[in-house]
Image: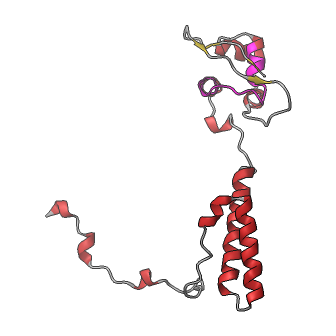
Amino acid sequence: MSIGHCVPTGLGQTVPPIPTTVGPVAQPLHRLAAVRRLQGISRGTMARRLNIDLRQLAEQERETADVPLSVVYQWQKTLEVPISELLVETDDGLSLPVLRRSQLLRLMKTVLAVAEHAKQPSIRRMAQTMAEQLIEIMPELAEVSPWHAVGKRRRLSELGVAAERQLSDEIFVNREDE
């Protein structure tokens, strides 16, 4: 369920209601209150500067409030801080579905590489069974190919073929100068 109130922008316009979630605690979306406190600005002063009442300010300051970007920019201008200071960075990297997909993809590539290089029929059958089970979990894995096994890995001190190729000086000449 979502509850919201129209927020005046101070320019004679209003911003659509700020949705607030009712139910389980959501993750923090911004740091408006924390930055305001760090700047030493009271709630009353901030409300006056934003041309909103204290109730609206309290709603906006709630870390889990889905505040419109236009409102965050008003706070940024009023607090005179970089916008990045007001936003919460996620430290969990990939979202869980994307992380799971990448893990299954790597696992499928490994299983296919084992099936491709296995000398014993029993290992190839086991790898084939694992591949079929992975495809049951995630059908798009049917299009995956095994890890590339061409050539040998270079050491960090070795140069690749591209570094050994000679380039003619003509490609560095500015054609407009001619």
Coloring scheme used: secondary structure
- Magenta stretch, main secondary structure, is helix
Q: Tell whether 170 sits left or right of 142.
A: left
In the picture shown, does residue 151 fall above or below 8? below
As drawn, the residue found furthest toward the bottom would be 119
Tally the marks: 0
Residue 151 in the image, given as x and y percentages of width and height:
55, 87
Q: Tell whether 101 sits left or right of 168.
A: right
Residue 46 in the image, given as x and y percentages of width and height:
71, 17
Residue 74 in the image, given as x and y percentages of width and height:
61, 23
As drawn, the residue found furthest toward the left would be 178
Q: Quadrant of the N terminus?
A: top right
Query: Visible in this render: residue 166?
Result: yes
In the picture shown, does residue 86 fall above or below 132? above
User: As rendered, which of 2 and 27 lies closer to the eye?
Assistant: 2
Q: Residue at x 65, y 26 (%)?
A: 79
Q: Quadrant of the C terminus?
A: bottom left
Is residue 127 one of those drawn in magenta?
no
Could you say which quadrant of the image residue 169 lies in?
A: bottom left
Residue 168 in the image, given as x and y percentages of width and height:
27, 79
As drawn, the residue found furthest toward the top would be 12
In the picture shown, does residue 164 fall above or below 22? below
Q: Residue at x 73, y 61 (%)?
A: 136
Q: Tell whether 62 sits left or right of 49.
A: right
Which region shows up in magenta?
56-74
Q: Residue at x 72, y 28 (%)?
A: 32
Query: Visible in this render: residue 9?
Result: no
Is residue 58 one of those drawn in magenta?
yes
Could you say which quadrant of the image residue 60 lies in?
A: top right
Could you say which quadrant of the image residue 155 lies in?
A: bottom right
User: As rendered, which of 125 and 148 lies closer to the eye?
Assistant: 125
